[in-house]
Image (spheres, rainbow, N blue to C red):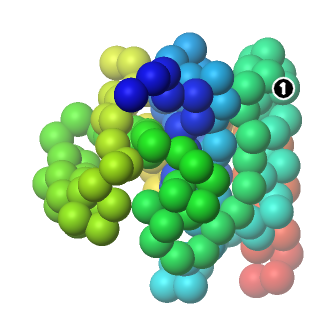
Amino acid sequence: MGSVKLAVYPGTFDPITLGHLNVAERACKLFDRLVIAVGINSVKEPWFTPEERCEMIREAARERGLENIETTTYTGLTVSFAKKLGARVVIRGVRPLTDIPAELTMMMANRRLAPEIETLFLIADGELAHVSSSLIKEIAGASECDEKSLRSFVPRNVAEAVMKRIQERKARG
């Protein structure tokens, strides 16, 4: 079967969090290349464009010295995208308990669609396991939130981008 050189880590990453990056850092140790794939989902209303999300990920990866990370966008089924890249593993970051039922359902569907692709579940380290993009947006929306508060949950560049986006949204009314 040989070694697995490439894995895909898909998600919306709106925005990427320290929990996401923790999973990515650990996956980078297991694979020669990790493609962080920003999914474009027409149902969700993201704060950042796919290109902005990719750039935030690239900058955060550079700051951490993660040289084997690539970032791109995709639409459609994750397993189809992974096959197109020649990846045999899809990384899924899960938060304890809350994500497990939906992730297992998705994994089983993916196994039926592409049995040659494995799903590897990674849980972010303890203090980051609860952090989600939705939580970041909720915290950022609080009037007393500042960039320093966000830095507990997201990288510096993302905290700056989130605060800028909050100011833009307030200016628009």
Direction from residue 56 to residue 77 in the image, left or right: left
- For mark 1, give the secondary structure: helix
Amino acid marked by disc 1: Arg
Q: Is residue 161 above or below residue 125?
A: below
Q: What is the tally of numbered marks visible in this picture?
A: 1
Comparing 83 with 137, the one in front is 83
- Please indicate whether residue 164 sits to the left or right of residue 130 in the image: right
Q: Is residue 11 visible?
A: yes
Rate crowding at label 1 as few (under 14), some (14 to 19) or many (20 or more) other CA atoms within 10 Å. few
Residue 156 appears in the picture as rendered: no
**Residue at 64% over, 23% down:** 32
Q: Pick the residue in front: 32 or 153.
A: 32
Q: Nearer the viewer, residue 28 or 152?
A: 28
For the C terminus, the image quarter is bottom right
Q: Position of residue 38 (x, y in %)?
A: 64, 58
Relative image position of residue 161 (x, y in whole percent): 81, 50
Please say if 136 is above or below 169. above
Q: Is residue 30 above or below residue 132?
A: above
Give the image location of residue 101, x and y in percent.
Answer: 14, 54
Q: Report the front residue among 127 and 40.
A: 40
Depicted 125 relative to depicted 24: above or below: above
Q: Quadrant of the N terminus?
A: top left
Q: Residue 49 is drawn in which quadrant?
A: bottom right
Q: Which residue is mark 1?
A: 62
* Residue at horizontal 56 percent and vertical 14 percent from the top: 29
Residue at (79% x, 45% y) in the render: 56
For image coordinates 84% across by 26% down, the residue present is: 62
